[in-house]
Amino acid sequence: MGHFGWTRFMTIIASKATLSFDDNSTPVSLPVYESTIGPAGIDIRSLYAASGRISYDPGFMATATCQSSISYIDGENGILLYRGYPIEQLATQCDYVEVCHLLLKGELPTVQEKKEFEANIADDAMIHEQMHFFFRGFRRDAHPMSILVATVGALSSFYHDSLDISNPEHRALAATHLLAKVPTLVAMSYKYSVGQPFVYPRKDMPYTANFMRMMFSTPSEDYKVNDVLVRALDRIFILHADHEQNASTSTVRLAGSSGANPFACISAGIACLWGPAHGGANEAALSMIRHIGSIDKVPAFIKSTKEPGSHARLMGFGHRIYKNVDPRATLIRETCHEVLNELGLNDDPMFKIALEIERIALEDDYFISRKLYPNVDFYSGIVQSALGIPSSLFTGIFALARTVGWIAQWKEMMSDPDSRIGRPRQVYVGPIRRDVPPIERR
Ligand code: SDX
């Protein structure tokens, strides 16, 4: 059964909100738009004109910057939906290419649609040969995210066939270029760091197996596909594909709102994802586990993260929206078991330390009272390490997987009638107007 992607932009005013002031200023009436699920939205666009006041919400704790129909998080109940489908079903019944089709087009593909979609991506996975020269400018120990920020942005200097963002065909072509070429660039950044030759993508291999071959194949030994390990990485891609208006997605949308080309927007998203409070947490979580080093040192470390004023955090724990277990963490923990079992690493000390951290933290009032649970980044480093992926590349893998979500959100923004250049306001608390004194009187 064929489907077409759909995006319903909110038009239904559920009710009105009245904002009153205790200084007898005129109350302001604001429309409230209903959602399909989750919180309704109070439209405050008329607030400043009506009251001379603006809202104040650093970090967007309670502010929607857009309307979207791509993914939905119920943080209280630990639920994540992609276009309405529960992440648990997608991660166990679909592969990443099907999920890419779902996120980009609004529906899961039929057998024929999937075949065409995957072939279209496979045909486009090579990068312009001249881009290889970019890598020689980097030190061999350059962080892969620095290489990805640079090379993904540089795609715009090669693929002029997809830079006219007002042209839907260009937008679709840019989406294919990015879905197809980011894995190639991620694998190349790894090969460059280990001094091995780049491995070209193959058209006759499925998406994730192709990536693993580009990562681990060498001229002296071809990569032997292990279906359990490929399936595990494919599931990690699915679990990282999209997540509402997180920091990096919001960065992509803000960059896109100025009319920047899609490659530059995704490069901006990669830069934001790099931060340890966001996508960099998977790398930080594994180095934290390695730093703890043994199960008997777990209680002391956890204690150190609770001390008032302590900047130490339990990396891979906590989330702005999930106030229950991140469903992705549960699925990645299961994947961890499968991979370690397949590789005969059931006694992996890092995994045992991670399980002990989770056990102790979930019984500790500090974490319970703050609703801090394992998030997507807590176990993903252990799985990726077991797959042979270096910790410096973990966030690059996250960027690879999230590229489809960033593109889907960017495309949705481009077709949103409400979309305009993002330009937040501020509450100014600096000096009032004053005149410049001559230097001898300063
Ligand atoms: C991702 O947004 C997304 O959807 C992101 C993401 C995605 O898919 O795109 O899900 C991916 O980024 C997951 C998060 C990865 N980051 C980490 O694991 C880093 C560790 N976690 C934290 O830095 C923190 O929990 C955040 C950044 C995730 C959330 O920060 P918030 O919502 O701004 O919460 P906060 O910093 O205000 O913390 C509230 C309280 C504070 O204590 P008090 O001041 O109330 O005493 O909880 C404490 C914090 O000190 N706290 C932690 C903690 N996280 C919060 N204490 C110890 N360890 C932690 N991890």
Image: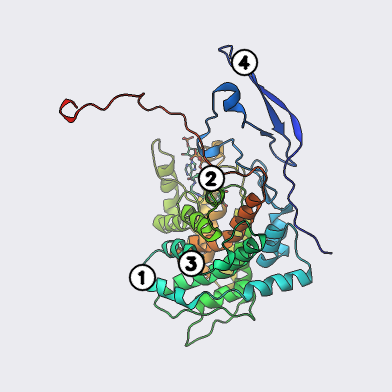
Between tags 1 and 2, which lies in front? 1
The answer to whether mark 1 is within 8 Å of ligand 1 is: no
Inspect this view and state whether residue 72 appears: yes
Q: Helix, strand or loop at disc 4?
A: loop
How far apart in space, not on screen, are marks 3 and 4 (Cα)?
Answer: 53 Å
The correct choice, above or below, for 254 with respect to 20 in the image is below
Residue at the far left: name it.
Answer: 440
Residue at the far right: name it.
Answer: 1
Q: Quadrant of the C terminus?
A: top left
Q: Which mark is residue 318?
A: 2
Task: Tell me which amino acid carries mark 2.
Answer: Gly
How busy is the neighbourhood of tag 4: few (under 14 within 10 Å), some, or many (20 plus)? few
User: Foreground residue, 222 or 251?
Assistant: 251
Residue shown at 61% from the left, 47% from the top? 325
User: Would residue 111 appear left or right of 257 to someone viewing this image?
Assistant: right
Q: Helix, strand or loop at disc 2?
A: loop
Q: Which mark is residue 341?
A: none
| Pointer 3 residue | 157
The answer to whether mark 2 is within 8 Å of ligand 1 is: yes
Q: Which mark is residue 26?
A: 4
How busy is the neighbourhood of tag 1: few (under 14 within 10 Å), some, or many (20 plus)? few
Between tags 1 and 3, which lies in front? 3
Task: Tell me which amino acid carries mark 4.
Answer: Thr
| Pointer 1 residue | 137
How busy is the neighbourhood of tag 2: few (under 14 within 10 Å), some, or many (20 plus)? many
Q: Helix, strand or loop at disc 3?
A: helix
Which of the marked residues, 1 or 3, is nearer the chain's N terminus? 1
How far apart in space, not on screen, are marks 1 and 3 (Cα)?
Answer: 17 Å
Q: Quadrant of the N terminus?
A: bottom right
User: Would residue 305 appear left or right of 204 to someone viewing this image?
Assistant: left
How far apart in space, not on screen, are marks 1 and 4 (Cα)?
Answer: 61 Å
